[in-house]
Amino acid sequence: MTDLPDFLRIDPATRRVSLDGRNPAFYSDPNVIYALLHEHCPTFYWEEQKQCFFTGYDHVNMLLRDRRFGRQILHIADREELGLPPPAPHLENFDLAERYSLLELEPPEHTRLRTLVNRAFVSRHIERLRPEIAELAEGLIDGFAKDGGTELLSSFADIIPVTMIARMIGIPDDMGPQLLKWSHDYVGMYMFKRSKDDEYAADRASREFADYVKSLIAERRRNPSEDLLTHMIHTEHKGQYLSDDELVSTTIVLLNAGHEATVHQIGNSVRVILESGLDPADLFKDEATTERTVEETLRICAPVHIFQRWALEDVEIDGLSFKRGDKMSLILAAANLDPRKFSDPLAFKPDRQEAANLSFGAGIHFCIGAPLARLELNTVLPILFGRMPGMRIAKTPVVKDIYHFHGLERLDLVW
């Protein structure tokens, strides 16, 4: 049996795990801990989080698709029945912004909203953005290529995804920095480290974000344009249009999900490629090798680690019994490292031909922006490595203390 680090306790007999999610030794390199969990206890009760977690590929894949589980529970049960506390007054704006989120809804509401948005994100429409993404990447590189070094997140990775999703929705480029600030405060609600101050910041960001989106909606009603927001306002589904609250929630989730994870993934991908010792010229020599390289970076350093599900009925999974209203977590990044699906799972091997990674989820909540994220990664990474062939890491990258989203504080490069 492999020795465990002193901050991790695993009892395979009871399937209980003690692990401090705020420990830098964990969140800086969670893959090592995931490997230990696969070895000793792939399904476990995480004592600090007071919840069951699944890491096995087959279980995670199944739970993402199984309609006995859902992203919400209050559509079939009330808070009193489930023993849930009442909504917190200081999170009123955040809760309102989340009320019609594509990430949280179940059918039929989810089906209606997703149908109205999905057309804009299918691959054949997204592919048209490739020249625009490439032009943006080239322009950003022009800005630092002669400097001999750069901090890649602020000069490159932060800018591309937020600019592209904002343009699709119909938001001016100069709003990018403000959108990033709102988004960072908003997603603070999903972190293990969440404090009361984080909650107040998220609620304030939700209010300001919503007010801005409402002003855009009013403008697009007066002056329709060729953008996604206009499409959502003026398109009906079975005789119904989206309400203002639905438009606000949908726009916020598209902006947040449309850039947050991709920012992290650009940084994660560049890091893993540079640390691998493999020649980037071989990894990006053609479209096929580029796609395989990108998928392998998504597998080994996924930007989103946890998705949660509610049991919508009494059910047994992997020998554990769940009652209706029980909540569980699926660790997507750990499922990508399941040794029963991937040989030598901790190794970066772009020539793999094994299972598909689960980094974008699966089932009806499969990431609607996956085609956009993949296009951005497949476009900008070859350009970056092609323009900067001598690029190397200047100092050890520091991982953000946010665990749920796996990304870097900064990535300092020199050439």
Image: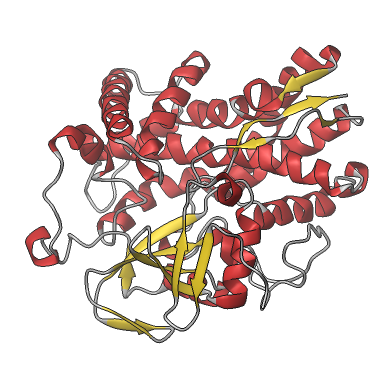
Quadrant for the N terminus in the image: bottom right
Q: Position of residue 247 (x, y in %)?
A: 29, 36
Quadrant for the C terminus in the image: top right
Query: What's the coloring here?
Result: secondary structure
Q: Residue 53 vs residue 369: left or right?
A: left
Q: Position of residue 224 (x, y in %)?
A: 36, 23
Q: Position of residue 298 (x, y in %)?
A: 66, 53
Q: In this view of the protein, can residue 376 be seen by the observer?
A: no
Q: Nearer the viewer, residue 127 or 8?
A: 8
Q: Quadrant of residue 66?
A: bottom left
Q: Residue at x 49, y 53 (%)?
A: 367
Q: Nearer the viewer, residue 77 or 112?
A: 77
Q: Residue at x 87, y 33 (%)?
A: 386
Q: Residue at x 21, y 32 (%)?
A: 93
On screen, residue 46 above or below 204: below
Q: Nearer the viewer, residue 364 or 7?
A: 7
Q: In this view of the protein, can residue 283 be seen by the observer?
A: yes
On screen, residue 120 above or below 227: below
